[in-house]
Image (tube, rainbow, N blue to C red):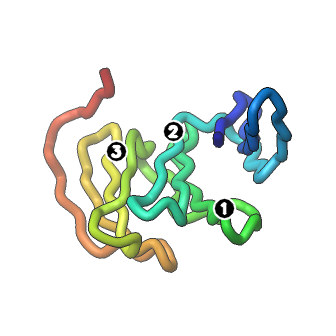
Amino acid sequence: LYLSAQEGILFFYHIKGLQYEMKICAEILQPISSLIFSPDYTVLLLLTDQGTVYTYKPAHSGEAVKLLDACSSCFLAADFLAPGIMYCVSVTVSGEVQVWLLEDGTCLSKLNLDVEVHVT
C-alpha cells in the first residue's frame, strides 16, 4: 500500500495479516495530490499541489525524480498513456493538454483546449 502525507512524503506499508511495516520511500517536500501507477505497476507518478510531476520506481527503491515542473499553469492531472510506460499525458488549469516522454520529460505534443479546467 502506497500513500502520501501532507508534508510530501511517500510511504509504503507492507501488510501481512495483522502485522505491518512502514517505510518512507521518498520525500519531495511538496504536498502530494495524486498517486497514479503505470499499467504494469513499475512506475508511480506523483502529482503535487503545486503542479509538479515526479516519477518513482518501487522496484528500484530510489528517490522520486522530478519529471515535469509547473510553468505558467499548474498541472491539474496526469496519467500514463497505455499501452506501456513510455508516455504520460497532463492537463493544466488553463486547459493545455500535453504528451510527455517519461524517460526525460520531453514534451512531444501540446493541444490548447481554450477552456479553464476543473476537477470535480
Label 3 Cα crowd, 10 Å radius (few <14 / some 14-19 / many 20+): many
Rendered view: 64 above or below 10: below
- In the picture of the structure, the residue carrying the numbered disc 3 is 92
Answer whether labels 2 and 3 touch (C-beta < 8 Å). Answer: no
First in sequence, mark 2 or 3: give its number: 2
What percent of the width, then of the height, locates residue 40?
A: 43, 64
Residue 107's spot in the image, x, y percent? 36, 72
State whether residue 96 is above or below residue 13. below
Task: Please tell me whether mark 3 sits on a helix, a strand or a loop.
Answer: strand
Residue, x 18% and y 52% (percent of image)?
A: 112
**10 Å neighbourhood of mark 2: few (<14), some, or many (≥20)?**
some
Three-letter amino acid code at the position of disc 1 = Pro
Q: Quadrant of residue 10?
A: top right
Query: Which mark is nearer the camera, 2 or 3?
Result: 2
Q: Which mark is residue 34?
A: 2
Q: Which residue is mark 1?
A: 58
Q: Is residue 56 left or right of residue 102?
A: right
Mark 1 lies on a secondary structure that is helix
In the image, residue 88 sits, relative to residue 60, either above or below, namely above
Q: Position of residue 103 (x, y in %)?
A: 49, 78
Alpha carbon separation for disc pair 1 and 3:
27 Å
Q: Which mark is residue 24?
A: none
Q: Amino acid at mark 2?
A: Ser
- At label 3, which amino acid type do we have? Thr
Q: Examine the image and state in which quarter residue 63 appears.
A: bottom right
- Residue 79 in percent (x, y) is at 37, 52
Left or right: 54 as drawn, with respect to 113: right
